[in-house]
Image: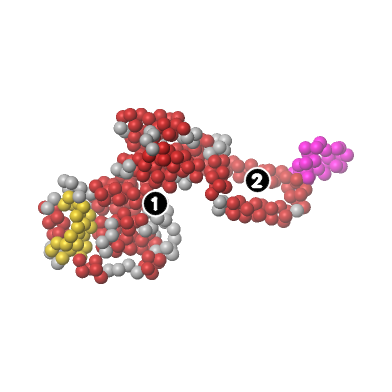
């Protein structure tokens, strides 16, 4: 039987593809290994010609429940393990899809497997689903394909995703308590304004005492909320709608992102530090994966999910391309801490940028 294959030459890393006759997939893999090649994809020549993915199949995978980042991390870990055990990429994807509880994710994996069998590269197939596989993911997979060490790349990618999940959980835990305190404080204020102040007003009125100016203002607010409750709710609803509408504009989102990192305690100690950690972790991972610094900065700017940080990273990238150093440009950006810039500087001098940025997280 004729099989199509894509493989890399072990000694040079050069990619080759062709058709080879073999009794089975295992026989073909052995033949390629004897020729000094590492198989990336293997599929029946006739089957690949027949199998086509319909637009209906591609659309169908978008209709189920969304995919969580935790599920992506688990998938990546499973793929690294199965590839490391010697399974071919298509076989590994098949096996993982069979055990998935998320139907949407399983359908996407099956479509990707079919596209690989039809001759597409794994990274190209993944890039068609950016809502599932972020640009960081596809860039690293592409780098792994080029070097012929996909299973090692997937293992490193799994570590990165797992560490990102842990960071996310830490941020959630740190934010949870302040939000609870703020929510409780708002509830207490509402109880005071709507129930306690009217009673105190009655007591002062009956006693014939004149209320101070500040107290009269508070009583006025209380009476407005109490006797115009529907209007009060309408104002809150209108403010929410106005905020949602304003968030469509990039300038307003930029302003909100700037305010986030300036909030006392929560912004400066939690959100800002989490952003720095994500920047350092992502840039270090991409750079260690063989992606050049300029491209790594470009991708990092896309995934930080913070417009102020993204603007700073893009400015750094432009100046790095022009010949400046990473550490020097990080120092010029107020959003970066002195420690992160110092670690980048030491990394550039010692040739260990990735390692030292990773320690900053």
Q: Secondary structure at mark 1?
A: loop
Residue at image x 48%, y 42%?
A: 311
Type of secondary structure dominating the magenta stretch: helix
Assess whether mark 1 and mark 2 are in contact (beta carbons under 8 angstroms): no
Return the x and y of residue 218 as percentages of the image width and height: 76, 42
Q: Residue 205 in magenta?
A: yes
Q: Judge whether residue 178 can be spotted in this image.
A: no
Q: Classify mark 1: residues with Cα within 10 Å, few (<14), some (14-19) or many (20+).
A: some
Return the x and y of residue 102 as percentages of the image width and height: 39, 60
> Along the polypeptide, which appears first: circle 2 or circle 1?
1
Q: What is the image's colouring?
A: secondary structure
Residue that protrudes farthest toward the front in the picture: 322
Image quarter (top left, top right, bottom left or bottom right) of the C terminus: top left
Gap in angstroms between the C-alphas marked 2 and 1: 40 Å
Please say if 174 is above or below 120.
Answer: above
Q: Which residue is mark 2?
A: 187
Image quarter (top left, top right, bottom left or bottom right) of the N terminus: bottom left
248 vs 327, left or right, is right
- Front-most of residues 353 and 168: 353
Q: Which residue is mark 1?
A: 134
- Front-most of residues 194 and 60: 60
The residue range painted magenta reads 195-220
Return the x and y of residue 167 as percentages of the image width and height: 43, 42
């Amino acid at each position: 039987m004729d099989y199509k294959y894509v493989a890399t030459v072990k000694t040079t890393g050069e990619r080759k593809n062709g058709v080879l006759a073999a009794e089975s997939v295992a026989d073909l893999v052995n033949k390629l290994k004897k020729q000094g090649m590492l198989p990336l994809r293997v599929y029946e020549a006739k089957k690949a010609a027949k199998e086509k993915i319909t637009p209906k199949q591609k659309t169908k995978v978008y209709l189920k429940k969304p995919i969580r980042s935790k599920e992506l991390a688990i998938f990546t870990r499973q793929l690294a393990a199965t590839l490391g055990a010697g399974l071919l990429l298509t076989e590994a994807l098949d096996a993982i899809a069979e055990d998935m509880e998320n139907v949407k994710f399983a359908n996407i994996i099956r479509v990707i497997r079919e596209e690989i069998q039809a001759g597409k590269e794994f990274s190209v197939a993944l890039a068609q689903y950016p809502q599932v596989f972020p640009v960081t993911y596809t860039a690293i997979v592409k780098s792994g394909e080029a070097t012929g060490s996909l299973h090692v790349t997937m293992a490193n990618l799994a570590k990165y995703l797992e560490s990102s999940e842990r960071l996310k959980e830490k941020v959630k835990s740190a934010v949870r308590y302040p939000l609870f305190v703020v929510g409780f404080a708002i509830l207490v204020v509402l109880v005071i304004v709507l129930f306690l102040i009217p009673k105190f007003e009655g007591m002062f009125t009956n006693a014939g005492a004149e209320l101070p100016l500040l107290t009269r203002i508070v009583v006025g607010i209380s009476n407005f909320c109490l006797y115009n409750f529907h209007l009060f709710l309408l104002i809150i609803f209108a403010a929410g709608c106005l905020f949602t509408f304003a968030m469509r504009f990039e300038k307003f989102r930029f302003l909100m992102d700037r305010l986030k990192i300036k909030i006392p305690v929560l912004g400066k100690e939690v959100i800002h530090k989490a952003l720095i950690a994500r920047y350092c972790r992502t840039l270090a991972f991409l750079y260690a994966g063989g992606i050049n610094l300029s491209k790594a900065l470009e991708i990092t700017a896309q995934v930080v999910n913070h417009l102020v940080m993204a603007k700073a990273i893009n400015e750094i990238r432009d100046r790095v391309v022009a010949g400046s150093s990473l550490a020097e440009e990080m120092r010029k950006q107020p959003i970066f801490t002195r420690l992160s810039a110092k670690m980048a500087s030491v990394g550039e001098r010692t040739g260990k940028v990735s390692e030292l940025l990773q320690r900053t997280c």
